[in-house]
Amino acid sequence: MRAIFVNLIWLIAYFMKNLVVLISGLVLMSSNLGHAQSAFDKMTNSKLEKILYRVSEQVERIPGSEDTPGRWKMVYMQRELFVITDEAANRMRVMTPIIEEENLDSEDMKVLLEANFDRALDAKYSLYQGFLWSSFTHPMQELTVEQFKDAIKQVATLADRYGDTYSSTDLVFGGESEEQ
């Protein structure tokens, strides 16, 4: 009788251990599902627009683009930003002009390229149509709400820190220049 009781205890312990492993696995899977993006969660122009109205002091369609979806001008941190999308190409961009390109010299260009490597994280310095821009580009459908909000903040911060730290956040990632 004692042997049956010991075997029963061992069997219960074995099943309890496997149950704990199974439950742990399910919890881990469910927590990872919170980070996965389903087909229903894909970013769209209408979702981006709703987010813009939540985070911005002012949002409007870019003048002349009323018939083209995915073209907004907004004010964020007292700075004018543009959000441009192309759903068919699955791309989106957040950008703001900083200064005219003609005001940059070769030393400025060197600093900007170095900043793009280690201080400008997701937002980058770019040249376009005669201006230096702070910009963020990403596949649109895969973009999460938090990534979009962070992109807006990084673009504005990178532009504001031009001429100072040249950084989009307080984090510096990567190498340092030889002078440092």
Image (spheres, rainbow, N blue to C red):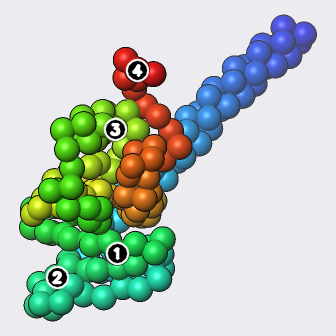
Residue 27, above or below 65: above
The residue tagged 4 is: 179
User: What separation in Å lies between label 1 and label 2 (alpha carbons)?
Assistant: 19 Å
Q: Earlier in the sequence, mark 1 or mark 4?
A: 1
What kind of residue is marked 4? Glu
Q: Residue at x 55, y 39 (%)?
A: 28
- Cα distance between the residues tagged 4 and 3: 14 Å
Determine contact: label 1, label 2, CB under 8 Å. no
Q: Which dot, 1 or 4, sits closer to the camera?
A: 4
Which residue position holds label 1?
A: 80
Q: Is residue 87 above or below residue 32?
A: below
Residue topped by disc 3? 115
Q: Name the residue under label 2.
A: 69
Residue 109 picture location, percent across and down: 22, 40
Tell me: 43 left or right of 79.
left
Dot 4 or dot 2: first in sequence order is 2
Which is closer to the viewer, label 2 or label 3? 3
Mark 2: give few (<14), some (14-19) or many (20+) Cα within 10 Å: some
Task: Tell me residue 173's x, y (percent).
Answer: 43, 31
Front-most of 48 and 59?
59
Total numbered labels placed on residues in the image: 4
The disc labelled 2 sits on which kind of residue?
Answer: Pro
Residue occupying the far top of the picture: 3
